[in-house]
Amino acid sequence: MKRKNMTTYTRFITALLFLILLISGTTNAQQKPTDAERLAWWHEAKFGLFINWGVHSLYGGEYKGHQQARGGAEWIMNRCKIPVVEYREMAKQFNPVNYEPDAWAKMAKDAGMKYLVICMKHHDGFALFDSKASDWNVVKATPYGKDLLKPLAEACKKYGIKLGIYYSQAVDWTNPGGSAARRLMKEGWPNPDSAKIDRYTKEHDGHWDPAQLTATFDEYIDKVAVPQVKELLTNYGEISIFWWDYEAQMKSLDGALKLKNVLALQPNIITNDRLHPDLHGDTKTPEQAIPDRDAVAGINWETCMTMNNSWGYRKSDNNWKSSETLIRNLIRITSRGGNYLLNVGPKPDGSFPAESIQRLSDIGKWMKTNGEAIYGTQASPLSDLPWGECTKKELKNNTILYLLIFNWPKDGQLSVPGLKNKISSAKLLGSGEKLKTSITTNGLNISIPETAPDKIASVIKLELKGNIVNTNTSATKNKMQRGALD
């Protein structure tokens, strides 16, 4: 009788433990978001702000009286082969007294941006946050002496902006052991020792200073990169995006996997494809280019672009893209189903260049009226539109098309080739003015006002019955471009 009771008791405990494990497993499965759930807000957002800032901003693209010969100003340490001790000394001048994170976040929001990605450590290894893994950071190495990320994270939360982090996980020119990514001396300044330096960098995997070689790459990953990523994902609340850079320089798959495993600290986080060539992340990252439609059809992608020619602040770079170009870039990217990450390179004092502020304001004014044609849309089902671009939303058995018109027809008639669905409504998005439509043998015809409501891009909102047949037939001719920010 006693043995039978013990057997019954054992079975009961076993069953209870199994039930607890089952419930726990179910709960964990429910808590772990699917890819679609993690990316839902990102697909809705479409538009974000990229910020590249650091000690490199102090140089402004100039070294020893010479303009950096090639590339973005954030690469000045490498291209000009600045010694580690000299570059670290420069941090003593980094004192961004005009840094106003609240103003940064508000400018992003007013521009119609839904997320912000800030460079917390670029290739020069300088951390813009308080790090215990390296003393080469804004708190310990500068007179400013304060964490730059914490107040920005609070400002983003205040304005409803999703916060993302850029982190150079492989290339690091000041913390020993990091990759160098070799560049020739001629890309910097006319150093009389150029030939000697180029020979040295060729023999030392791109490094130009013996101080860079006092640790191995694996030691760098274990002692700097992994601990810093943990700090970023632990000390600043929700991080929505982790933006790696320069996967070609990630010399260890094991090291990359260590970094990837740290991401488990934030289960909802989204990552790009620049951690390691074998680790593809969530999003593709074409750089400074808008890819062909077919090259990015059906994938998650985000084009990052500068407002002028440099990611980091460069005093001499006045080649600013116009507000019209930036807005039309946003439209073209959205019409292909992508996101637009638009860069600002703050000045050393923490202020945005006036040209950037003006362009963000101009974009915001356009978005305030026309943002409906951008947010939450899908790629255009129509191709080869002579007057502009198109975005789409699907609502059950109906479809909304937004026609974004760059070239306003002078004859008062807008033709949409191949579109023959029944039209429920056609109106100008800005004013709500209703427009007359008719179906012709070639497609849809819309009678429009003589003058364009918006010189940059006027928007017509079409509500149609049923789904739209995709008429995109152009063959892929150009591959999607991407590379380390350079």
Image (spheres, rainbow, N blue to C red):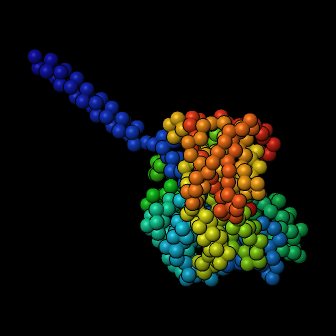
Choose between 224 and 307: the one closer to the eye.
307
Q: Tell whether 51 sits left or right of 418.
A: left
Choose between 410 and 281: the one closer to the eye.
410
In the image, residue 473 above or below residue 281: above
Choose between 21 and 439: the one closer to the eye.
439
Residue 351 at what x, y percent from top left?
60, 78
Residue 312 at what x, y percent from top left?
68, 70
Choose between 158 and 418: the one closer to the eye.
418
Mark yes or no: residue 98 visible.
yes
The C terminus lies in quadrant: bottom right
Residue 465 at what x, y percent from top left?
56, 37
Q: Which residue is drawn at 73% across and 57% down?
A: 408
Q: Which residue is drawn at 66% across and 63% down?
A: 454
Q: Residue at the far left: name it.
A: 1
Residue 462 at what x, y percent from top left?
60, 46
- Rendering quarter of residue 380: top right
Q: Which residue is drawn at 31% across and 34% down?
A: 23
Q: Which residue is drawn at 50% across and 37% down?
A: 396
The N terminus lies in quadrant: top left
